[in-house]
Image (cartoon, coloured by chain):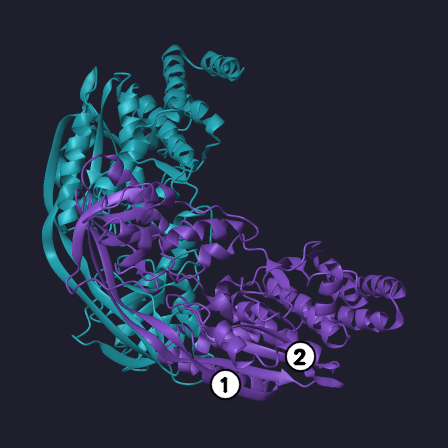
Chain colours: A purple, B cyan
Amino acid sequence: MRIALLAAAAATLVATLPAKAADLAATAVSLREKALVDSTAWNVVESLTTEIGARPQGSPAMDRARDWGVAKLKSLGFTNVHVETFEASSWLRGAESAEIVAPYPQKLQILGLGRSTPTPPGGIEAEVALFKSLDEMIAQPPGSLAGKIAVVTQVMRRTQGSEGYGAGVRARGGGVEAAKRGAVAYLVRSISTDDTRLPHTGGATMSGIPMAALSPPDAELLERMVARGKPVRIKLAMDSTYRDKAPAYNVVGEIKGREVPDEVVIVGGHLDSWDPGTGAIDDAAGIGISTAAAKLAGAQRPRRTIRVVMWGAEEQGGSGAAYAAAHKDDVAKIVVVSESDLGAGEIFNAKLPLGSLNHPAMRAFSGAVTPLKVIVSRSPAQSGGADTEGLRALGVPVAEFNQDVSRYFDLHHSADDTLDKIDPKELAQNVAVWAAFIYTVADSDIDFRKTAAEAK
Amino acid sequence: MRIALLAAAAATLVATLPAKAADLAATAVSLREKALVDSTAWNVVESLTTEIGARPQGSPAMDRARDWGVAKLKSLGFTNVHVETFEASSWLRGAESAEIVAPYPQKLQILGLGRSTPTPPGGIEAEVALFKSLDEMIAQPPGSLAGKIAVVTQVMRRTQGSEGYGAGVRARGGGVEAAKRGAVAYLVRSISTDDTRLPHTGGATMSGIPMAALSPPDAELLERMVARGKPVRIKLAMDSTYRDKAPAYNVVGEIKGREVPDEVVIVGGHLDSWDPGTGAIDDAAGIGISTAAAKLAGAQRPRRTIRVVMWGAEEQGGSGAAYAAAHKDDVAKIVVVSESDLGAGEIFNAKLPLGSLNHPAMRAFSGAVTPLKVIVSRSPAQSGGADTEGLRALGVPVAEFNQDVSRYFDLHHSADDTLDKIDPKELAQNVAVWAAFIYTVADSDIDFRKTAAEAK
């Protein structure tokens, strides 16, 4: 029954498109159906989280992840598999602890933020100055936080798209503002939508003071304690190591194009992760989705080359810039670039390169993904993901496949970022969308620079 | 509108009961309505979790909790507030860590189990023998686990009542069986219904080997690693201190009966907690519910005395037995005893003492709690809670107020046992049920020993 209906739907779609586009559409539909029952992405994610786990930039685990990436791409039949080495900063966590020492002694659950300064050995102890928003802290005059531990307990709003995170994540960077006002340390409620007692780490701007995330229940405990009106004192001990330049790696593999192999469609995820979890949703999922979709699309032998890049230093920054710098002379041949880096939730919204919406190839794509409940937006793509920014700045067109992140920020950058949180069906929906996109671009002659120029 | 309907319902209830019972019923209904909007229980829970937090038996925090209990009961108007000191064992956690060292290095999230033996300084390293059920491990012959770390990854079933926990918790005690077969340590998947990367601790029988709980995602990681067929090695370092006899405290307060003050209704919760969370659902909730209900019921000046006991060593055992031993000569005057110790979820089912179901006082109770969707069971109470077992063994009647524990074991004995997990409305429903029960027993002449004898 289902097969008959799908065949009928495909036939309808094909009938409304020009001949070449009709072939594209038929193959995209067939790829979608294959992707929905394909286990490659799941197997890749299972392998990376089980055999490597946490892999922060500059750690021995990241070296193992690099070797894993090379072996995985080779075993999946990719060619020209190689590592592109560069240098990026590396902040690695040491021992950390925090406790309220007065008026009511209690332990706190914290995680240092990337680029935090360590405390002196033995830690520091100071009184808390608590603010319920970053802006409230910023409103304080210079010197007003002298000798204090500044605490911001601003709460992130859960949203389907990334607006909640976009607004919330500002608070993670508040350490610089706290330091300017004399604070000796900065604690922030985790940028998280969950109520679990696990803090969420993340990168912050170096501020010269220790900076850490509190779990949401710990932030609320501090609020209640401060509300009693007695001075609250915290003891904080944090260690870490920081290198401005550590070896870093982008791992690359290709499926050569049938007709125009020098024209390249680039997709990928990032191989590095934060340390508390196993980097499952962030971003083994993106590695699995992009690799599986590239393999499925590539098996159709499209005209153009498909390249998978496993960027190696997204969390602490630098892999996208390094990739762009290394390939600045071939950007004209990069047809489009996009990174999967918002977890494993379903794609609910796709944004295509400017002006391409009505191109037959993109109509083939849209038609194929409509049954996956993907909204193909009238607005063009703004960003293809953090690691594509370098190429975008050099003029490479980008596309966006926006995942539903309603639950992503429950887990993101925390110990809870583990395989069991991924729904294999939602993961497969992602692969289906990416496979359809990769194929319709790689087997067509669509020129996104031209569609953009015509749209202006 | 609501008030009119409630008044009509109360009037109907009152009309079907004898005169004294009608008074009881009317007051029980009025108490129920007061309890549903009373904030005493919430305030007690907020105070205990904020001002004391984790309070394991034998810790300085438990001393502070004792003093807190005395002050709280006094401030709420209880009389004869006092501490009954006894001795109970105390196991206190030290530093703990675990990691997989081969074939794929990864850190593990563990929590030692109560009465675990520490590892030697520097820890132990051994190969894993993994079993997906306790019974599978028990089926192994003597000596077969020699030199191994036994791991049981049995999964707990989520149930509305406590059957899931009853079946699951056996695995926590598997250390003794592992040690008998030669194992050098025992790791068990947390007795938990959650998938958060927080382990759940709990008491275990002393086995002479280190014993710890794995978080659910860590148990699944080990399963996947073991399934690859290569030997899996774990390094485990655990420290703890154990005292067979440490000072312990039951904190007691009363509201004296109007007519027969020597007849006593005993209710309570337990004041001690495990260490990773703040002991909010286990069992600040029970302390808050029983104290608030006793206060509300006591404000009606019932015939009999209402006594609140904050038992001091439920988690590691001994407070119920100590209470019974200290009061063995007055058990004849204890009308009934019950403990609230299953969290803050709604009461969905009440079990009354044998033979009492149709007594007018219990019909007054039943009628009052039916609108709270409480099923008053045809089956009699079997247990009034862990701390009532000593009194029950001496013939004291017990009652059960079974809470919906569908979510309780997501949090229980873990760092996630924090105030924010409690719904104030659900907490208030508990207070309403307890207040109705306490009052209908304390202001009647019901004799549960007599109803039980007549039922036999």
Q: Amino acid at mark 1?
A: Val
Nearest to the observer: residue B318 or residue A201: A201
- Residue B116, by quadrant, is bottom left
Nearest to the observer: residue A43 or residue A62: A62
Nearest to the observer: residue A236 or residue A277: A236
Q: Amino acid at mark 2?
A: Lys
Q: Name the quadrant of the C terminus of chain A.
A: bottom right
Looking at the rendered structure, whether the residues under marks 2 and 1 are on a common chain is answered as yes
- Residue A441, by quadrant, is bottom right
Give the image location of residue A180, x and y in percent: 28, 52
Disc 2 and disc 1 in contact, CB within 8 angstroms: no
**Residue B338, can we see it?**
no
The residue under the point 47% across, 16% down is B13
The residue under the point 74% across, 71% down is A447
Compared with B398, A398 (above or below) is below
The residue under the point 54% across, 53% down is A162
Give the image location of residue B281, x and y in percent: 33, 44
Give the image location of residue B91, x and y in percent: 17, 58
* Dot label at residue A199: none
Nearest to the observer: residue A456 or residue A187: A456
Question: Which residue in the protein does label 1 denote?
Answer: A83
Question: Which residue in the protein does label 2 denote?
Answer: A333
Q: Pointer 2: residues within 10 angstroms few (<14), some, or many (20+)?
A: few
Subunit bearing disc 2: A
